[in-house]
Amino acid sequence: MNLNLEIKNNIATLYFDLENEKVNKLSFKVLKEFDLLLDEIIKNRDIDALIIKSLKENIFIAGADIHEIKQFTNEDDAYNELIKADNILNKLENLKIPTIAYINGACMGGGLELALACKYRVATTNSSTKFAFPEIKLGFFPGIGGTQRAPKLIGLINAMDLILTGKTIDSKKAFKLGLIDDYFDKGQEDSKLNEFINLVINQKIKRANKKSFFEKFTFTRDIIFKKATKNIESKVNKNFAAPYKALEVLKQTYNKDINEGLKIEASTFSKLAVTKESKYLIELFFLSEKIKKDYEKSDDKISTALVVGNGVMGKGIIWLFSKYLKQTRIKLRSLEKAHEMINDISKLYDYFIKSKKMSQSQVDLKLSTLSYTQNFDGLQDIDLVIEAIIENEKEKKDLFLNLEKNLKDTAIIASNTSSISIEQLSKNLKNKENFMGIHFFNPVNKMPLVEIIPNSKTSTKNINKVKQSLISMGKMPIVVNDCAGFLVNRILLPYLNEAAFILEEGSNITTIDNVLKEFGMPMGPFTLADNVGIDIGFHVSKILNESYGERMPISNLITKIYNEKLFGKKTKKGFYDYSNKNIIENNHIYNYTNDIRVITDEEIRNRTIFIMINEASRCLEENIVSDADIIDFAMIAGTGFPPFRGGLLKYANYIGIKTVVKELKRFEYLYNKRFEVSNLLLQLEQKQLDFKTGETLWKH
């Protein structure tokens, strides 16, 4: 049994507690069980009220069973299951007695839809008590009444904000929106819940109308929908249908009877649930959950850290450590820089203060964990050192030797290098088992991916220790074998360079950026280069060129821009001119280009994306990672490759390996070695396999 019904003093309490599961999920099997218990409740005329609770710690209902949605291949099957679920929640909503969802823990997706079918909702103030409709991130939207009940309860604008973004809110915000009727500390459960039940039974609960005045009228409501559409268009690629379809359902059903609205919701949901985009996003969700659990729990945790390097990356890492570790020490060249440093780090907390996720006093407490040193003193208690200085092998090696002399023997030393070989950097160290690469992505406060790169002697214990620490900080670490550029930069730099090669031949900056934004990249390659810093891109490209030769040449354009010190945003000029409020193309760049020919959008897309596919296949071939899914995850989490396309190699599978190889061979004929087709791709084509079916070719 997954559900238990208990009746005391005419109050029925229905407990969710799924067998052999850590969380409660609203599967179709559980809903059937729920339906039978509702029938029991209907028959019992002595019941005055129904309370729905969870016996799981920190979980009310975490959502629908995504495995069931993943298995849908037929629209009709999905629609029929949803209508059955709707009938069950309608039965709950139509009970003659008051129904109260008592929420202590995560109330997500289908769990929130079930709570909305109750007449009342109360919640605890626990930090684990959160509310969300996260379905949009999986390629669909709430499918068992969420689009129908939420607008009626909290108003159209508030409902759209939750449904179209998948954002998570706490009890305080949920109460403000009218999503719940009351909230209190878990310790007050007995008295406060009983008090609320009595108020409900005696019909003394008053609920404020949360609907906006503007949604009452057709013409103002149309303005709301138009504004919402423009907002989605500015943020979401047109090829990702879920938010557009969700908005369409909200618009179509606003004034409809709930039963009619539920049919439209179920029909549209069913169409989305069987798309490849949805399947990709579900697979990505399962993979991210797997990565979050991919470590062994240990009491030997990292609690103190030292950061050496005060550039953009260094500051981001210091911010991260200040938020999660007990003490963070900062190695400065001059202590006079300390005040400027603290100001820059405190700015990274602004979002948390503005969004009221943290108070100023909480931020001040975090900042108080920072300390400074100009020398190599006070380091005996440090568990982890991260180096984030310039990409210079000799300077890094000298630093590591100095650190090793001044740290305890068990301290982990790590480099945030984006391209230099970790094996090479570890060469002169005595305790090689304590050394590794920990490569964060910029900006550290937003990018979830972290590459962990061991050298040949790095201990498994230390890798696990770092993984555990990073996961506790909300990061997604993957272990990558050592090579120049590691995984993400090795694949991404050819993409950025190829965009520059295309610009040299013809086209223009804006067109190339727009083509790749339309493909689904979060920003075009030139905007990305300007944001990261063209100087950094040039240095990484140089290291990759030294390692991979003519297969990874640096475009003449990049070299010339670098020599002119046009580094992008940091110097106010790069591919774009940032001198004024309006960002425009830097026309000076065209002095270095030749308008030789017209380059089609398709060629721009294929040259930049296929060159990445080719390099990714080499990473599998060389066992830099042994899982194609990890490459897909890394490119999504590290570069923003469009998640709805499933990842770089799933996109290759979709296009067809034969097509990819044919185009690469054509480009190789035109542009020589940089498009030379990998052995793995040639084998996949010959054996008529792809990156899903051809695993045995690289897993040996």
Image (cartoon, helix red, strand yellow):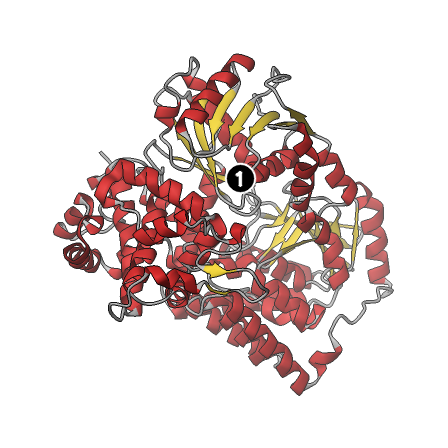
Q: Which amino acid is tagged 1?
A: Met
Q: Nearer the viewer, residue 515 or 650?
A: 515
For the residue labelled by badge 1, is the local secondary structure a helix, a strand or a loop?
Answer: helix
Q: Is residue 12 shown to the viewer in this render?
A: no
Image quadrant containing the C terminus: top left
Q: Nearer the viewer, residue 100 or 160?
A: 160
Q: Nearer the viewer, residue 147 or 88?
A: 147
Q: Residue extending furthest left?
A: 686
Q: Position of residue 677 (x, y in %)?
A: 18, 49
Residue at (65% x, 67% y) in the render: 159
Q: Is 482 situated above or below 536?
A: above
Q: Position of residue 429 (x, y in %)?
A: 42, 16
Q: Is 345 situated above or below 158?
A: above
- Describe residue 162's horizontal placement relative to residue 10 as left or right: left
- Give the residue pinned by disc 1: 313
Residue 232 appears in which quarter of the rendering? Answer: bottom right
Q: Position of residue 436 (x, y in %)?
A: 43, 26
Q: Is residue 363 shown to the viewer in this render?
A: yes
Q: Residue extending furthest bottom?
A: 219
